[in-house]
Image (cartoon, rainbow, N blue to C red):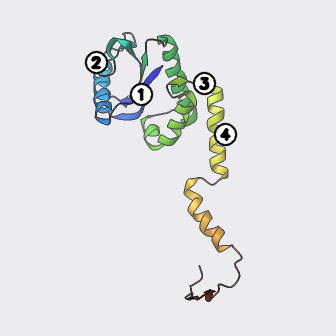
Amino acid sequence: MIKAILIFNNHGKPRLIRFYQYFAEDMQQQIIRETFHLVSKRDDNVCNFLEGGSLIGGSDYKLIYRHYATLYFVFCVDSSESELGILDLIQVFVETLDKCFENVCELDLIFHMDKVHYILQEVVMGGMVLETNMNEIVAQVELQTRMEKSEGGLSAAPARAVSAVKNMNLPEIPRNINIGDINIKVPNLSPF
């Protein structure tokens, strides 16, 4: 099972953090620092698998990572996962990001965090691998993008709401409301 997915740059700045096992926030920060130090000090010509750090479970867990340009993609998994399978999963995830963002870079992860999380959720959910077919993942992302565009996106929602209220065909607003012994006078309201 996948316990955590960490993406950070060459300087150790986290760009995507997803824990599938509960850790307190201060512990998460320590895990990120320790993982970065373990992974970043390794040469590029050595194996991409290593034992988990002391904070994340030691020898019971494995860190499987790939270094692309300025980003480290690290998956922390338990001993039941295949190292080569996870390495291939990282490749599928990165290629999917590359296809969705057309030459993905660190800035895409920063400025399009919602889309990156959506792509990740198409691949892994709850620590379990859902999909490894890149074409299927891209098709789902494109479907989500089309739905957002057809709805005008979240940023257009307030403008659509105001427009809908303006276009409502309301009868004359009552000036006096009488309910039993209660008499309410409604002040004159300016039109939109």
Tell me the tag on residue 167.
none
Closest to the observer, 40 or 18: 18
Q: Is 147 placed above or below 187 here?
A: above
N-terminal-most mark, 4 or 1:
1
Residue 91 picture location, percent across and down = 51, 21
Q: Nearer the viewer, residue 89 or 125?
A: 125
Q: What separation in Å lies between label 4 and label 1 (alpha carbons)?
A: 30 Å
User: Please, what is the three-letter code of the amino acid marked with disc 3?
Assistant: Glu
Three-letter code, disc 4: Leu
Label 2: which residue?
54
Q: Which residue is mark 4?
A: 143
- Mark 3–mark 1 Cα distance, whole angstroms, equals 20 Å
Residue at mark 1: 21
Nearer to us of marks 3 and 2 is 2
Q: Mark 3 or mark 2: which comes first in sequence?
A: 2
Quadrant position of residue 137: top right
What amino acid is found at the position of numbered circle 2 in the picture? Answer: Ser
Q: CA distance from mark 2 to mark 1?
A: 16 Å
**Residue drawn at x 40%, y 13% as measured from the top left:** 48
Residue topped by disc 3: 131
Earlier sequence position, callout 3 versus callout 4? 3
Seen in the picture, residue 187 relative to 80 is either above or below; the reply is below
